[in-house]
Image: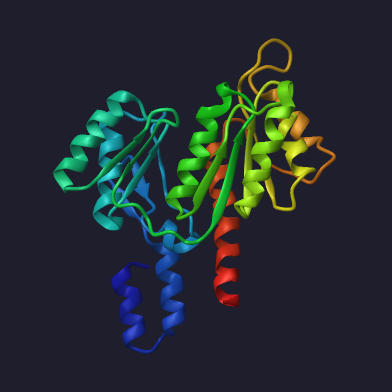
Amino acid sequence: MDIAGILKKLKNNEITPEEAECQLKIGTFEQLSDIAKVDIHRVKRVGIPEAVLADCKTDEDIVSIARVHLEHEGRAIITRASEENYTSLKKLAGEKGAKTRWNERARIVVIGEPVPKTGGRVGVISAGTADIPVAEEAKVIAEEMGCSVTTIYDAGVAGIHRLFPELTKLVGNGVDAIVVAAGREGTLPAIVSGLVDVPVIGVPVSTGYGAGGKGEAALLSMLQSCSVLTVVNIDAGFVAGAFAARIANLAARHRNHKV
């Protein structure tokens, strides 16, 4: 049912305001020509913003979908973007009078004003420097969900002594969840999970080569962890960042409620 139909039922007292809100959240999207059904209410429905995955889309399609998000929500997030995509999206932002943020490592473009801080706190750790792009994707997404993010980079098991002083600081900052990105053998998330009392999300990264390369050994290692660990798919920084932010935002809501 379209919005007009839902509002008509509400006006005629055929449904309650709560039922109308539920139907509006579930059924609202924008049909864009024959290429996309743009979910313009995802962040209101589930608390996680919709993102435009640039992979396998033309530059024109990316800009068109981003334009719909800007018109309805005032912001757009584009992941796995290229320099060419960024140039086109920056032009779109200029037309709309919106700010643009470009994280080259994470390959993420964000158009629109920063979201208000929720009080949620997320930690992001990378095992090696090769894992930083995926870690940065998680960081950007957590920030776009209102969280403050503290990072520790290049602290893998080959020189584990590098981790402990930084991890002490991270825990001291009171983080609510930690994302750990690791390629090769993917050991670091299990180690971190065995040392802290907050949820840890492991992200296997497609570094490494030969047998078990492309993140496969890291994924299997994390799935076999003896310590309690949540694991997302290979290179899924977006999912890890969003999941950590969801945990952190719930924790922040609980803290605010107690106060």
Relative to residue 258, is residue 200 drawn left or right?
right
**Does any portion of residue 52 appear in the rendered image?**
yes
Q: Residue at x 46, y 78 (%)?
A: 19
Q: Residue at x 74, y 53 (%)?
A: 197
Relative to residue 161, is residue 181 drawn left or right?
left
Percent from the top left, x then y, of residue 256?
54, 72
Q: Please say if 241 is above or below 14.
A: above
Q: Please say if 230 is above or below 14.
A: above
Q: Residue at x 41, y 63 (%)?
A: 27
Percent from the top left, x then y, of residue 130?
56, 21
Residue closest to the far top? 210
Percent from the top left, x then y, of residue 241?
54, 45
Residue 140 sits in which quadrant? top left
Residue closest to the far bottom? 13
**Does any portion of residue 217 appear in the rendered image?**
no
Quarter of the image that includes the C terminus: bottom right
Q: Residue at x 62, y 42 (%)?
A: 179
Residue 239 sits in which quadrant? top right
Give the colour scheme shown: rainbow
Between 101 and 231, the one lying in front of the other is 101
Q: How many marks?
A: 0
Residue closest to the far left? 95
Relative to residue 71, is residue 189 drawn left or right?
right
Residue 154 sits in which quadrant? top right
Quarter of the image that includes the N terminus: bottom left
Percent from the top left, x then y, of residue 162?
68, 29
